[in-house]
Image: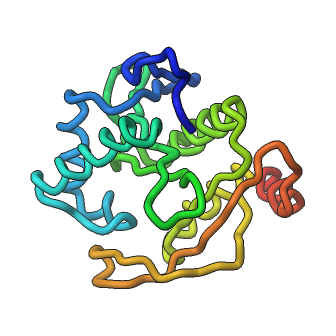
Amino acid sequence: MSKAPDMSIADIRIETERLILRPPQAGDFEGWATFFADPEATRHMGGPRSEPLAWRHFLMMVGAWNIQGASSFSLIDKRSGQWLGWCGPWHPAGWPGREVGWSLAREAWGRGYATEAARALLALARTLGHKRLFASHFVDNPASGRVLQKLGFCPTGVVRSRFSPGRGGESPARQLSLTLGEPSDCDDDIAAMRAA
Protein backbone atom coordinates (compact mmCIF):
# COMPACT_ATOMS: atom_id res chain seq x y z
CA MET A 1 0.00 0.00 0.00
CA SER A 2 1.41 3.36 -0.82
CA LYS A 3 0.17 6.87 -1.25
CA ALA A 4 -0.41 8.54 -4.60
CA PRO A 5 2.78 10.29 -5.80
CA ASP A 6 1.25 13.80 -5.65
CA MET A 7 -0.33 13.32 -2.23
CA SER A 8 1.20 14.34 1.10
CA ILE A 9 0.94 11.88 3.99
CA ALA A 10 -0.95 14.57 5.91
CA ASP A 11 -3.61 14.57 3.13
CA ILE A 12 -4.47 10.88 3.52
CA ARG A 13 -7.87 10.35 5.11
CA ILE A 14 -10.43 7.58 4.87
CA GLU A 15 -13.93 7.99 6.26
CA THR A 16 -16.35 5.24 7.16
CA GLU A 17 -19.80 5.56 8.67
CA ARG A 18 -18.39 6.13 12.18
CA LEU A 19 -14.63 6.51 11.79
CA ILE A 20 -11.91 8.69 10.36
CA LEU A 21 -8.73 6.79 9.48
CA ARG A 22 -5.67 8.98 9.04
CA PRO A 23 -1.92 8.76 9.63
CA PRO A 24 -0.97 9.34 13.28
CA GLN A 25 -0.50 12.95 14.34
CA ALA A 26 1.38 14.32 17.34
CA GLY A 27 -1.87 14.93 19.22
CA ASP A 28 -2.69 11.20 19.07
CA PHE A 29 0.15 10.27 21.39
CA GLU A 30 -1.84 10.85 24.58
CA GLY A 31 -4.33 8.14 23.52
CA TRP A 32 -1.48 5.91 22.34
CA ALA A 33 0.30 6.22 25.73
CA THR A 34 -2.95 5.57 27.63
CA PHE A 35 -3.55 2.47 25.52
CA PHE A 36 -0.05 1.13 26.23
CA ALA A 37 -0.48 1.71 29.98
CA ASP A 38 -3.51 -0.63 30.03
CA PRO A 39 -2.44 -4.25 30.71
CA GLU A 40 -5.71 -5.73 29.43
CA ALA A 41 -5.82 -3.66 26.22
CA THR A 42 -2.20 -4.55 25.40
CA ARG A 43 -2.39 -8.22 26.36
CA HIS A 44 -2.42 -9.40 22.74
CA MET A 45 0.37 -7.13 21.62
CA GLY A 46 3.05 -7.68 24.18
CA GLY A 47 1.71 -6.15 27.36
CA PRO A 48 1.93 -2.66 28.80
CA ARG A 49 4.80 -0.34 27.97
CA SER A 50 6.22 2.69 29.70
CA GLU A 51 5.54 6.08 28.16
CA PRO A 52 9.04 6.21 26.57
CA LEU A 53 8.48 2.78 24.95
CA ALA A 54 4.98 3.78 23.83
CA TRP A 55 6.61 6.86 22.24
CA ARG A 56 9.05 4.62 20.36
CA HIS A 57 6.18 2.48 19.06
CA PHE A 58 4.27 5.58 18.02
CA LEU A 59 7.30 6.94 16.14
CA MET A 60 7.89 3.53 14.52
CA MET A 61 4.44 3.71 12.93
CA VAL A 62 4.93 7.36 11.90
CA GLY A 63 8.33 6.46 10.44
CA ALA A 64 6.88 3.52 8.49
CA TRP A 65 4.58 6.00 6.71
CA ASN A 66 7.65 7.93 5.57
CA ILE A 67 9.86 4.94 4.69
CA GLN A 68 7.30 2.43 3.36
CA GLY A 69 4.56 4.77 2.14
CA ALA A 70 1.91 3.31 4.45
CA SER A 71 1.50 2.08 7.99
CA SER A 72 -1.08 2.06 10.74
CA PHE A 73 -3.84 4.65 10.68
CA SER A 74 -5.12 6.32 13.81
CA LEU A 75 -8.81 5.52 14.28
CA ILE A 76 -10.79 8.58 15.26
CA ASP A 77 -14.44 8.62 16.33
CA LYS A 78 -16.17 10.81 13.76
CA ARG A 79 -18.64 12.32 16.24
CA SER A 80 -16.44 12.96 19.27
CA GLY A 81 -12.97 13.26 17.70
CA GLN A 82 -11.70 10.73 20.28
CA TRP A 83 -8.69 8.55 19.40
CA LEU A 84 -9.91 4.93 19.53
CA GLY A 85 -6.86 2.94 18.43
CA TRP A 86 -5.11 2.06 15.22
CA CYS A 87 -5.52 -0.23 12.26
CA GLY A 88 -3.07 -0.68 9.50
CA PRO A 89 -1.44 -2.33 6.58
CA TRP A 90 2.15 -2.09 7.73
CA HIS A 91 4.95 -4.32 6.44
CA PRO A 92 7.05 -5.75 9.27
CA ALA A 93 10.54 -7.04 8.52
CA GLY A 94 10.49 -10.73 7.59
CA TRP A 95 6.85 -10.78 6.47
CA PRO A 96 6.01 -11.80 2.90
CA GLY A 97 3.76 -8.76 2.47
CA ARG A 98 1.63 -6.15 4.20
CA GLU A 99 0.07 -7.19 7.49
CA VAL A 100 -3.40 -5.97 8.42
CA GLY A 101 -3.83 -5.58 12.15
CA TRP A 102 -5.47 -3.42 14.76
CA SER A 103 -5.45 -2.49 18.41
CA LEU A 104 -8.24 -0.64 20.14
CA ALA A 105 -8.52 1.19 23.43
CA ARG A 106 -10.66 -0.85 25.79
CA GLU A 107 -13.59 1.59 25.66
CA ALA A 108 -13.81 0.94 21.90
CA TRP A 109 -14.10 -2.86 22.21
CA GLY A 110 -17.21 -4.74 21.10
CA ARG A 111 -18.57 -2.01 18.82
CA GLY A 112 -17.42 -3.34 15.45
CA TYR A 113 -14.75 -0.67 14.95
CA ALA A 114 -12.01 -3.17 14.02
CA THR A 115 -14.18 -4.73 11.32
CA GLU A 116 -15.31 -1.34 10.00
CA ALA A 117 -11.75 0.01 9.82
CA ALA A 118 -10.31 -3.18 8.30
CA ARG A 119 -13.01 -3.22 5.60
CA ALA A 120 -11.99 0.32 4.64
CA LEU A 121 -8.34 -0.78 4.46
CA LEU A 122 -9.22 -3.75 2.25
CA ALA A 123 -11.11 -1.43 -0.12
CA LEU A 124 -8.06 0.83 -0.25
CA ALA A 125 -5.78 -2.15 -0.93
CA ARG A 126 -7.99 -3.24 -3.83
CA THR A 127 -8.02 0.30 -5.24
CA LEU A 128 -4.22 0.44 -5.08
CA GLY A 129 -3.95 -2.91 -6.88
CA HIS A 130 -2.56 -5.03 -4.06
CA LYS A 131 -3.00 -8.73 -4.64
CA ARG A 132 -2.38 -10.31 -1.24
CA LEU A 133 -2.46 -9.28 2.42
CA PHE A 134 -1.44 -11.13 5.54
CA ALA A 135 -2.54 -11.18 9.16
CA SER A 136 -1.91 -13.14 12.32
CA HIS A 137 -3.43 -13.56 15.75
CA PHE A 138 -2.22 -15.26 18.89
CA VAL A 139 -3.93 -18.60 19.29
CA ASP A 140 -5.32 -17.51 22.67
CA ASN A 141 -7.07 -14.56 20.96
CA PRO A 142 -9.69 -16.31 18.81
CA ALA A 143 -11.86 -13.15 18.66
CA SER A 144 -9.32 -11.53 16.30
CA GLY A 145 -9.25 -14.72 14.26
CA ARG A 146 -13.03 -14.57 13.85
CA VAL A 147 -12.88 -10.93 12.70
CA LEU A 148 -10.14 -11.80 10.19
CA GLN A 149 -12.14 -14.70 8.78
CA LYS A 150 -15.28 -12.54 8.59
CA LEU A 151 -13.18 -10.15 6.47
CA GLY A 152 -12.22 -13.00 4.12
CA PHE A 153 -8.79 -13.97 5.48
CA CYS A 154 -8.09 -17.70 5.39
CA PRO A 155 -5.84 -19.64 7.73
CA THR A 156 -2.62 -20.60 5.96
CA GLY A 157 -2.07 -23.62 8.19
CA VAL A 158 1.05 -21.96 9.59
CA VAL A 159 1.35 -21.39 13.32
CA ARG A 160 4.58 -19.69 14.39
CA SER A 161 5.90 -18.64 17.74
CA ARG A 162 6.03 -14.88 18.18
CA PHE A 163 7.56 -13.10 21.10
CA SER A 164 5.05 -11.59 23.47
CA PRO A 165 6.27 -9.97 26.70
CA GLY A 166 2.67 -9.91 27.94
CA ARG A 167 2.62 -13.71 27.76
CA GLY A 168 6.08 -14.09 29.26
CA GLY A 169 7.89 -15.16 26.08
CA GLU A 170 7.16 -17.02 22.86
CA SER A 171 3.54 -17.80 22.10
CA PRO A 172 1.89 -19.49 19.09
CA ALA A 173 0.35 -17.17 16.48
CA ARG A 174 -1.85 -18.36 13.61
CA GLN A 175 -1.13 -16.84 10.20
CA LEU A 176 -3.82 -15.96 7.67
CA SER A 177 -3.83 -14.45 4.19
CA LEU A 178 -6.27 -12.85 1.81
CA THR A 179 -5.94 -12.82 -1.97
CA LEU A 180 -7.74 -9.72 -3.20
CA GLY A 181 -9.96 -9.88 -6.26
CA GLU A 182 -10.36 -13.66 -6.15
CA PRO A 183 -12.86 -15.94 -4.44
CA SER A 184 -11.56 -16.99 -1.05
CA ASP A 185 -10.59 -20.59 -0.39
CA CYS A 186 -12.65 -20.34 2.75
CA ASP A 187 -15.75 -18.64 1.27
CA ASP A 188 -18.08 -21.38 2.55
CA ASP A 189 -16.75 -20.92 6.08
CA ILE A 190 -17.11 -17.14 5.80
CA ALA A 191 -20.70 -17.37 4.54
CA ALA A 192 -21.56 -19.60 7.50
CA MET A 193 -19.91 -17.20 9.96
CA ARG A 194 -21.76 -14.19 8.50
CA ALA A 195 -25.06 -16.04 8.73
CA ALA A 196 -24.45 -16.95 12.38
Image position, residue 151 (x, y; %): 69, 49
Instruction: Name the residue: 29% across, 74% down.
Output: 166
Report the quarter where the C terminus lies: bottom right
Image position, residue 183 (x, y; %): 88, 51
- Viewer-proximal residue, 132 or 28? 132
Q: Answer above or below: position of 60 versus 22.
A: below
Q: Tell me if 125 is positioned left or right of 139 in this view.
A: right
Residue 186 occupies which quadrant of the picture? Answer: bottom right
Q: Answer above or below: position of 61 versus 93.
A: above
Q: Answer above or below: position of 127 versus 85.
A: above
Q: Tell me if 71 is positioned left or right of 122 in this view.
A: left
Q: Tell me if 46 is positioned left or right of 109 in this view.
A: left
Report the quarter where the N terminus lies: top right
- Viewer-proximal residue, 111 or 50? 50
Q: Tell me if 81 is positioned left or right of 7 in this view.
A: left
Instruction: Name the residue: 46% across, 50% down.
Output: 102
Instruction: Name the residue: 23% across, 54% down.
Output: 36
